[in-house]
Image: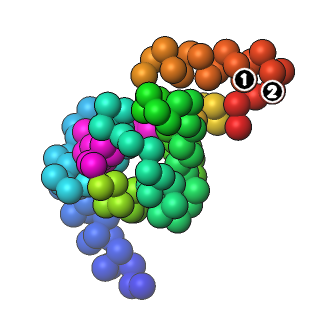
Amino acid sequence: MKLGAMLKDVLTSLFRPPVTQNYPAQKAPIAERFRGHLFYDPAKCTGCGLCVKDCPSNAIELITLDRAAKRFIIRYHEDRCIYCGQCVLSCKLKCMGMTNEQWEMAALNKQAFEVYYGKEEDIETFLESCSHAGAQPD
């Protein structure tokens, strides 16, 4: 590269405002069809398991507490998820979806990436039964 061309680029860059975006102070608008954080509605779920079967990265586990009473828990591993949206497409009853509002999901430890979906009392019961068994919920 010639010195004159480089000097010209340096001088024009000094008097031009920066092109970079000041993230996180200024956030760009997110596309409407962007696939971010998974959400789940346990009231609609029948426990068919299609979301689990069709997930290419094994990021979803269906835990059945009582099939007759429709008590299910979904264990979602965000660190495994590739955000393809296949689980949402496979769900016949539309009880799963991906939001475009929550997409900043960084964390300092790996435990934050394991999310339980379901009714609060069912999740508490399941986690207590796992802790009494002396094992981590896996």
How many C-alpha atoms fall within 10 Å of the one at disc 1: few (<14), some, or many (≥20)?
some
Which secondary structure class fits the magenta region best?
Answer: loop
Q: Position of residue 81 (x, y in %)?
A: 50, 53
Q: Which residues are magenta?
A: 93-105
Q: Quarter-wise, where is residue 26 in the image?
A: top left
Indicate left or right for 17 with 120 as reference.
left
Real-space Cα distance between discs 1 and 2? 6 Å
Q: Position of residue 133 (x, y in %)?
A: 81, 21
Badge count: 2
Amino acid of disc 2: Ala
Do callouts 1 and 2 mark residues in contact (Cβ within 8 Å)? Answer: yes
- The answer to whether residue 101 is magenta is yes
Choose between 15 and 104: the one closer to the eye.
104
Q: Position of residue 28 (x, y in %)?
A: 20, 46
Q: Position of residue 74 (x, y in %)?
A: 50, 38
Q: Residue at (78%, 15%) from the top-left corner? A: 132
Colour scheme = rainbow
Q: Which residue is mark 1?
A: 130
Evaluate whether residue 32 shows in this view.
yes
- Furthest-front residue in view? 68
Q: Residue at (27%, 49%) from the top-left corner? A: 93
Amino acid of disc 1: Cys
The quadrant the C terminus occupies is top right
Indicate left or right for 116 with 100 as reference.
right
Q: Give the numbered dot on residue 135.
A: 2
Q: Residue at (51%, 20%) from the top-left corner? A: 122
Q: Tag 2's secondary structure? A: loop
The quadrant the N terminus occupies is bottom left
